[in-house]
Image (cartoon, helix red, strand yellow):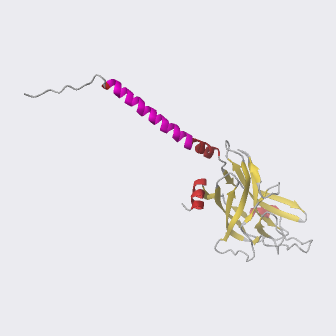
Amino acid sequence: MVDVIALDTSASLADWISAIGQAAGAVGTVAAVVVALFLPGWQRAKMRPVVTLEFDRTSEDLAVYESPPWASVWIRLRATNRPGRETARKVRVIASKVEPEEGSVLPENTLALRELTWSEVRAGELDLPPGMQRRIDVAHVDKKRTAKRDVVTPWPELGMGLAGWPQRYDGRDYLGEGAFWIKLTVAGENLDATEWEIRISFKKAGLSNRSSLARIRDAIEVSDPVLVSKETSLRRRRRLTGG
Protein backbone atom coordinates (compact mmCIF):
# COMPACT_ATOMS: atom_id res chain seq x y z
CA MET A 1 0.00 0.00 0.00
CA VAL A 2 1.36 3.39 -1.00
CA ASP A 3 1.22 6.16 1.58
CA VAL A 4 -0.08 9.46 0.27
CA ILE A 5 1.73 12.48 1.66
CA ALA A 6 -0.39 15.60 1.82
CA LEU A 7 1.34 18.90 1.03
CA ASP A 8 0.62 21.81 3.28
CA THR A 9 -0.53 24.57 0.95
CA SER A 10 -2.47 26.61 3.44
CA ALA A 11 0.22 29.27 3.85
CA SER A 12 1.96 28.97 0.46
CA LEU A 13 0.20 31.91 -1.20
CA ALA A 14 0.88 34.24 1.68
CA ASP A 15 4.49 33.10 1.84
CA TRP A 16 4.97 33.67 -1.87
CA ILE A 17 3.48 37.14 -1.66
CA SER A 18 5.72 37.95 1.27
CA ALA A 19 8.81 36.61 -0.49
CA ILE A 20 8.01 38.54 -3.65
CA GLY A 21 7.51 41.71 -1.63
CA GLN A 22 10.85 41.25 0.11
CA ALA A 23 12.60 40.59 -3.20
CA ALA A 24 11.01 43.66 -4.78
CA GLY A 25 12.07 45.73 -1.80
CA ALA A 26 15.64 44.46 -2.15
CA VAL A 27 15.67 45.21 -5.87
CA GLY A 28 14.30 48.67 -5.16
CA THR A 29 17.02 49.31 -2.60
CA VAL A 30 19.74 48.21 -5.03
CA ALA A 31 18.24 50.36 -7.78
CA ALA A 32 18.16 53.35 -5.46
CA VAL A 33 21.81 52.81 -4.57
CA VAL A 34 22.76 52.51 -8.25
CA VAL A 35 20.88 55.70 -9.11
CA ALA A 36 22.47 57.55 -6.18
CA LEU A 37 25.95 56.44 -7.22
CA PHE A 38 25.84 56.84 -10.98
CA LEU A 39 23.07 59.28 -11.92
CA PRO A 40 24.85 62.44 -10.70
CA GLY A 41 27.93 61.47 -12.73
CA TRP A 42 25.78 60.78 -15.77
CA GLN A 43 24.02 64.10 -15.36
CA ARG A 44 27.35 65.92 -15.06
CA ALA A 45 28.65 64.15 -18.17
CA LYS A 46 25.50 65.18 -20.04
CA MET A 47 26.10 68.83 -19.12
CA ARG A 48 29.87 68.76 -19.71
CA PRO A 49 30.93 71.25 -22.42
CA VAL A 50 31.73 69.91 -25.89
CA VAL A 51 33.73 72.29 -28.10
CA THR A 52 33.94 71.61 -31.85
CA LEU A 53 35.87 73.28 -34.68
CA GLU A 54 34.58 74.29 -38.13
CA PHE A 55 35.80 76.16 -41.21
CA ASP A 56 33.85 77.95 -43.93
CA ARG A 57 35.84 79.49 -46.76
CA THR A 58 32.92 81.69 -47.84
CA SER A 59 32.84 83.47 -44.46
CA GLU A 60 35.22 85.61 -42.41
CA ASP A 61 37.06 82.40 -41.53
CA LEU A 62 39.33 83.53 -44.38
CA ALA A 63 39.55 87.26 -43.75
CA VAL A 64 41.42 90.04 -45.56
CA TYR A 65 42.89 92.88 -43.50
CA GLU A 66 44.87 95.79 -44.88
CA SER A 67 46.01 98.39 -42.39
CA PRO A 68 49.47 99.77 -43.21
CA PRO A 69 52.13 98.70 -42.52
CA TRP A 70 50.34 95.33 -42.16
CA ALA A 71 48.63 93.58 -45.05
CA SER A 72 47.43 90.09 -44.26
CA VAL A 73 44.96 87.28 -44.94
CA TRP A 74 43.90 85.51 -41.75
CA ILE A 75 42.97 81.81 -41.56
CA ARG A 76 40.51 81.14 -38.76
CA LEU A 77 38.44 78.31 -37.34
CA ARG A 78 35.13 78.66 -35.52
CA ALA A 79 34.95 77.05 -32.08
CA THR A 80 31.44 76.27 -30.80
CA ASN A 81 30.29 75.03 -27.40
CA ARG A 82 27.40 72.60 -27.87
CA PRO A 83 23.97 74.09 -26.92
CA GLY A 84 22.48 72.89 -23.64
CA ARG A 85 25.86 72.36 -21.97
CA GLU A 86 27.68 74.24 -19.23
CA THR A 87 29.85 77.22 -20.07
CA ALA A 88 33.26 76.00 -21.27
CA ARG A 89 35.77 77.77 -19.05
CA LYS A 90 39.25 78.97 -20.02
CA VAL A 91 39.15 77.36 -23.47
CA ARG A 92 42.42 77.42 -25.35
CA VAL A 93 43.56 75.98 -28.67
CA ILE A 94 47.15 74.83 -29.04
CA ALA A 95 49.07 74.14 -32.24
CA SER A 96 50.61 70.92 -30.93
CA LYS A 97 52.34 69.78 -34.12
CA VAL A 98 53.17 71.07 -37.60
CA GLU A 99 54.22 68.62 -40.31
CA PRO A 100 55.13 69.59 -43.87
CA GLU A 101 53.52 67.63 -46.66
CA GLU A 102 55.86 65.88 -49.10
CA GLY A 103 57.47 68.54 -51.27
CA SER A 104 57.21 71.25 -48.59
CA VAL A 105 59.81 72.30 -46.04
CA LEU A 106 59.28 73.46 -42.47
CA PRO A 107 61.78 76.21 -41.54
CA GLU A 108 64.22 74.98 -38.91
CA ASN A 109 63.46 77.66 -36.34
CA THR A 110 59.65 77.56 -36.60
CA LEU A 111 58.19 76.99 -33.15
CA ALA A 112 55.06 74.86 -32.75
CA LEU A 113 53.45 73.73 -29.48
CA ARG A 114 51.98 77.17 -28.90
CA GLU A 115 48.63 78.57 -27.87
CA LEU A 116 46.78 80.28 -30.68
CA THR A 117 45.06 83.66 -30.57
CA TRP A 118 41.32 84.17 -30.19
CA SER A 119 40.25 86.53 -32.96
CA GLU A 120 39.44 90.16 -32.15
CA VAL A 121 39.78 89.74 -28.37
CA ARG A 122 43.52 89.04 -28.65
CA ALA A 123 43.70 86.53 -25.81
CA GLY A 124 45.02 83.00 -25.34
CA GLU A 125 41.95 81.70 -23.50
CA LEU A 126 38.31 82.62 -22.96
CA ASP A 127 34.96 81.27 -21.75
CA LEU A 128 32.43 79.87 -24.23
CA PRO A 129 28.78 79.85 -23.05
CA PRO A 130 26.53 77.11 -24.46
CA GLY A 131 25.70 77.66 -28.12
CA MET A 132 28.27 80.45 -28.48
CA GLN A 133 30.72 80.52 -31.37
CA ARG A 134 34.04 82.39 -31.48
CA ARG A 135 36.84 82.41 -34.03
CA ILE A 136 40.39 81.32 -33.33
CA ASP A 137 43.32 82.55 -35.45
CA VAL A 138 45.36 79.63 -36.77
CA ALA A 139 47.65 81.17 -39.40
CA HIS A 140 48.05 84.27 -41.55
CA VAL A 141 49.70 85.18 -44.84
CA ASP A 142 51.52 88.51 -44.70
CA LYS A 143 53.26 90.69 -47.18
CA LYS A 144 56.88 91.51 -46.41
CA ARG A 145 57.14 93.67 -43.31
CA THR A 146 59.72 96.23 -42.29
CA ALA A 147 60.94 96.10 -38.71
CA LYS A 148 60.43 99.31 -36.76
CA ARG A 149 62.19 98.09 -33.63
CA ASP A 150 65.41 96.15 -33.09
CA VAL A 151 63.55 93.37 -31.25
CA VAL A 152 61.41 92.63 -34.30
CA THR A 153 62.59 90.13 -36.90
CA PRO A 154 60.52 90.72 -40.04
CA TRP A 155 59.44 87.88 -42.27
CA PRO A 156 61.89 87.70 -45.18
CA GLU A 157 59.19 87.92 -47.84
CA LEU A 158 55.57 87.21 -48.64
CA GLY A 159 54.67 84.08 -46.65
CA MET A 160 52.52 82.25 -44.15
CA GLY A 161 52.98 81.85 -40.41
CA LEU A 162 51.29 80.60 -37.25
CA ALA A 163 49.05 82.95 -35.26
CA GLY A 164 50.43 82.23 -31.79
CA TRP A 165 49.68 83.79 -28.44
CA PRO A 166 51.36 85.91 -27.34
CA GLN A 167 52.35 87.23 -30.75
CA ARG A 168 55.98 86.59 -31.57
CA TYR A 169 58.32 89.10 -33.15
CA ASP A 170 61.39 86.86 -33.52
CA GLY A 171 60.42 85.24 -36.83
CA ARG A 172 59.85 81.78 -35.29
CA ASP A 173 56.21 81.81 -36.38
CA TYR A 174 57.23 81.78 -40.06
CA LEU A 175 56.20 78.87 -42.32
CA GLY A 176 56.80 80.45 -45.72
CA GLU A 177 54.94 78.55 -48.42
CA GLY A 178 53.84 74.98 -49.04
CA ALA A 179 51.35 72.54 -47.55
CA PHE A 180 51.31 71.73 -43.85
CA TRP A 181 49.31 69.41 -41.59
CA ILE A 182 48.59 71.14 -38.29
CA LYS A 183 47.38 69.31 -35.19
CA LEU A 184 45.32 71.38 -32.80
CA THR A 185 44.51 70.52 -29.20
CA VAL A 186 41.34 72.03 -27.75
CA ALA A 187 41.40 72.09 -23.95
CA GLY A 188 39.81 73.90 -21.04
CA GLU A 189 39.18 73.90 -17.32
CA ASN A 190 36.02 71.76 -17.42
CA LEU A 191 36.01 69.94 -20.76
CA ASP A 192 37.62 66.83 -22.19
CA ALA A 193 40.59 67.66 -24.40
CA THR A 194 40.20 66.90 -28.10
CA GLU A 195 42.73 66.78 -30.92
CA TRP A 196 41.95 68.03 -34.42
CA GLU A 197 43.85 68.13 -37.67
CA ILE A 198 43.70 70.52 -40.63
CA ARG A 199 45.68 70.98 -43.82
CA ILE A 200 46.73 74.49 -44.84
CA SER A 201 48.40 75.25 -48.15
CA PHE A 202 49.79 78.49 -49.57
CA LYS A 203 51.42 78.62 -53.00
CA LYS A 204 52.89 81.96 -53.94
CA ALA A 205 53.86 81.20 -57.54
CA GLY A 206 53.18 84.36 -59.54
CA LEU A 207 52.54 86.39 -56.38
CA SER A 208 54.59 89.18 -54.82
CA ASN A 209 54.27 91.98 -52.30
CA ARG A 210 52.58 94.00 -55.03
CA SER A 211 49.80 91.40 -55.46
CA SER A 212 46.36 92.21 -54.12
CA LEU A 213 45.18 90.52 -50.95
CA ALA A 214 42.28 89.07 -52.95
CA ARG A 215 44.76 87.19 -55.19
CA ILE A 216 46.75 86.07 -52.17
CA ARG A 217 43.54 84.83 -50.55
CA ASP A 218 42.76 82.73 -53.62
CA ALA A 219 46.15 81.00 -53.26
CA ILE A 220 45.25 79.67 -49.79
CA GLU A 221 43.66 76.25 -49.29
CA VAL A 222 42.26 75.06 -45.96
CA SER A 223 40.67 71.69 -45.25
CA ASP A 224 37.79 71.14 -42.85
CA PRO A 225 39.08 70.36 -39.35
CA VAL A 226 38.82 66.65 -38.52
CA LEU A 227 38.51 65.25 -34.99
CA VAL A 228 41.28 62.67 -34.55
CA SER A 229 41.11 61.86 -30.83
CA LYS A 230 39.28 62.65 -27.61
CA GLU A 231 40.70 62.49 -24.10
CA THR A 232 37.69 61.52 -21.97
CA SER A 233 37.71 62.25 -18.26
CA LEU A 234 37.53 58.50 -17.51
CA ARG A 235 40.52 57.69 -19.73
CA ARG A 236 42.45 60.59 -18.21
CA ARG A 237 41.77 59.33 -14.66
CA ARG A 238 42.90 55.83 -15.62
CA ARG A 239 46.09 57.18 -17.19
CA LEU A 240 46.90 59.33 -14.16
CA THR A 241 46.31 56.45 -11.74
CA GLY A 242 48.16 53.94 -13.91
CA GLY A 243 45.01 51.80 -14.34
Which corner quadrant of the image does residue 71 belong to? bottom right
Residue 59 seen in the current view: no
- Residue drawn at 80 percent across, 62 percent down: 73
Report the front residue among 158 and 119.
Answer: 119
Say which residue appears at 45% left-offset and 36% top-offset. 27
Q: Residue 107 at what x, y percent from top left? A: 73, 76
Residue at the farthest left position: 1
Whether 36 is among the magenta residues is: yes
Outermost residue to the top: 10
Q: What is the span of residues highlighted in magenta in the rendered image?
A: 13-38
Q: Name the residue furthest bottom.
A: 108
Quadrant hosting residue 5: top left
Residue under the point 65% across and 49% down: 50
In the rendered image, the residue lying farthest to the right is 148
For the C terminus, which image quadrant? bottom right
Question: Above or below — where is 242 with respect to 176?
Answer: above
Q: Whole-percent x and y of residue 187?
A: 69, 57
Position of 231 with respect to 68 (left or right) is left
- Decide if residue 80 is on the left or right side of residue 41: right
Q: In the rendering, at what x and y percent does residue 145 appear?
A: 87, 70
In the image, residue 184 lies in the stretch drawn in magenta? no
Q: Judge by depth and name the residue closer to the eye, 72 or 205.
A: 72
Please indicate whether residue 3 sits to the left or right of residue 43 in the image: left
